[in-house]
Amino acid sequence: MNTIFNFFNQNHQNIQSGIFVAVFLVCWFLEYYVSDSSFFPKKKHVLNNFLFSLSGAVIQVLVSVVFLKIILFENANNIGLIPYLNFKSGYLNILFAFIFLDFTYWLYHFLMHKIPVLWRFHSVHHSDSHLNVSTSLREHPFETMIRLGHYVLAVSFLGPALWIISLHQFIQIISKIIIHADLRLPEKTDRILSFLVLTPNMHQVHHHYVRPYTDSNYGDLFSIWDRMFKTFYTLKKEELKFGLDQYPESVQQPEAWYKMLVRPFINSNFK
């Protein structure tokens, strides 16, 4: 526990960023050698998703500055649900924070699919016709604002120590990179792991092009909420087709980042 506390409490951003890049690159190379999509223009696809992700970078930085001040203020004044509950064990603090934040993410993700005006922006992520590691970068800046706003509110209510939030975000980012990779676990391994945690196989079903599969497997780290609320679905690899049936095929191919940026404002197929 002390080792984990020291690492995330000392805010080793350079080391964490290096780990994120390393995981991304490992998934990238594994996709190249393991997946059966060598025909796909992967470099163009990744470049477009990367350039698109830069449109939300300023928002990420600005919200992070405000977010940090809120958390430091709460920690200094013992504000929030966790200080109120006063768990004696650091492990209980971590467990409670992770479960609470995971459920609020499930709810946020569910609403992004069910509220039409929110789906306009989230559908840009889903319209990627080839799921690979770069899809984890494909988030419209308006959705970035909504997602970060939700996270700030959830964490502000919870009031955990800053290092616990750093740990949660670290694991969350690693998970998002892995579950979007064009890789699959052996079916038996997936069945075991998916009883508790989100797996690449599960998230690929979430990116299947038609409902109810698109509206399933909303989880962030844990699969328990999807099982609890009956939104857990499975599909065999050969049945999967990524993208969205509401968009024409031309929109779902690798496209310029600025077209993805304006699409929610000009495309009426968002219900």
Image (spheres, helix red, strand yellow):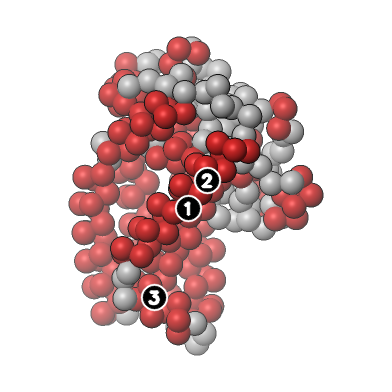
Residue count near mark 2 (Cα–Cα under 10 Å), binned few <14, some 14–19, many ≥20: many
> Up-down: is 4 above or below 149?
below
Mark found first going from the N terminus, 3 or 1: 3
Which residue appears at 55% of the width and 36% of the height?
Answer: 32
Q: CA distance from mark 2 to mark 3?
A: 25 Å
Reading the image, the residue beneath label 1 is 23
Residue count near mark 3 (Cα–Cα under 10 Å), binned few <14, some 14–19, many ≥20: some
Q: Which mark is residue 7?
A: 3
**Image quarter for residue 20?**
bottom left
Q: CA distance from mark 1 to mark 2?
A: 6 Å
Which residue appears at 25% of the width and 64% of the height?
Answer: 68
Name the element at disc 3: helix
Residue count near mark 1 (Cα–Cα under 10 Å), binned few <14, some 14–19, many ≥20: some
Question: The disc labelled 2 sits on which kind of residue?
Answer: Cys
Q: CA distance from mark 3 to mark 1?
A: 19 Å
**Image quarter for residue 154?**
bottom left
For marks 3 and 1, give the one nearer the viewer: 1
In the rendered image, residue 137, in percent from the top left (x then y), is placed at 40, 40
Q: Are marks 2 and 3 in contact (CB under 8 Å)?
A: no
In the rendered image, residue 249, in percent from the top left (x then y), is placed at 50, 13
Question: The disc labelled 3 sits on which kind of residue?
Answer: Phe
Q: Which residue is more in the foreground, 259 or 20?
A: 20
Reading the image, the residue beneath label 2 is 27
Residue furthest to the front in view is 33
Question: The disc labelled 1 sits on which kind of residue?
Answer: Val
In the rendered image, residue 14, in percent from the top left (x then y), is placed at 31, 63
Q: Are marks 1 and 2 in contact (CB under 8 Å)?
A: yes
In the drawing, does residue 265 fall left or right of residue 82?
left
Name the element at disc 2: helix
Residue furthest to the bottom in view is 88
